[in-house]
Image (cartoon, helix red, strand yellow):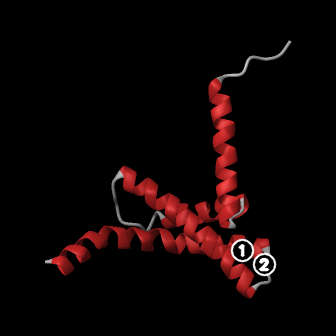
Amino acid sequence: MAEPTATTSGVIALASGVAGAILLSLGISWGLLIWSALGCIVGVTWAPETGRIRAIALFASAAMLSAKGGAIAANIWFAGSSETAQGIAAGLGILFHPALSVIVNELPKIVAKRLA
């Protein structure tokens, strides 16, 4: 007898496949993303306070940027070593999250000053 499947499990499977395809098309592996997210968790301790939605967006973008930066740096300087790429991605995550947070928080002031 077949087990019943819920619609949510199908949606979760589809979302997981789409996320994997997007990461693959960007040249980012799951390992890189995990290590960059761990770096961003450390980096969040130095980031200035911000709202919930902005914090989620900052974390996701910092994790993706540091993962891609780790992949590029490893390809350029370390012959594409995946372990080195993961270490670089974690280090970049520590730096990118607070830096990106400061940039995003100060950007409206900079734009308002330039347009005034």
- The structure residue drawn at horizontal position 64% and vertical position 56%, both measured from the top left corner, is 22
User: What's the mark number on residue 85?
Assistant: 1
Callout 2 environment at 10 Å: few (<14), some (14 to 19), or many (20+)?
some
Q: Is residue 30 left or right of residue 94?
A: right
> Contact (CB < 8 A) between labels 1 and 2?
yes
Q: Residues within 10 Å of mark 1 (few under 14, many from 20)?
A: many
Label 1 sits on a secondary structure element that is helix
> Between marks 1 and 2, how big is the CA–CA gap?
7 Å
The amino acid type found where label 1 is placed reads Ala
Q: Is residue 88 visible?
A: no
Q: Earlier in the sequence, mark 1 or mark 2?
A: 2
- Does residue 39 show up? yes
Residue name at image x 68 percent, y 31 percent: 10
Please tell me which residue is depicted at 72% across the width and 80% down the height of the picture. 74
55 vs 47: above or below: above
In the image, taking residue 24 as reference, residue 96 lies left or right, namely left
The tag on residue 80 is 2
Find residue 105 and name its label. none
Q: Which of the two residues, 94 or 89, is positioned nearer the viewer here?
A: 89
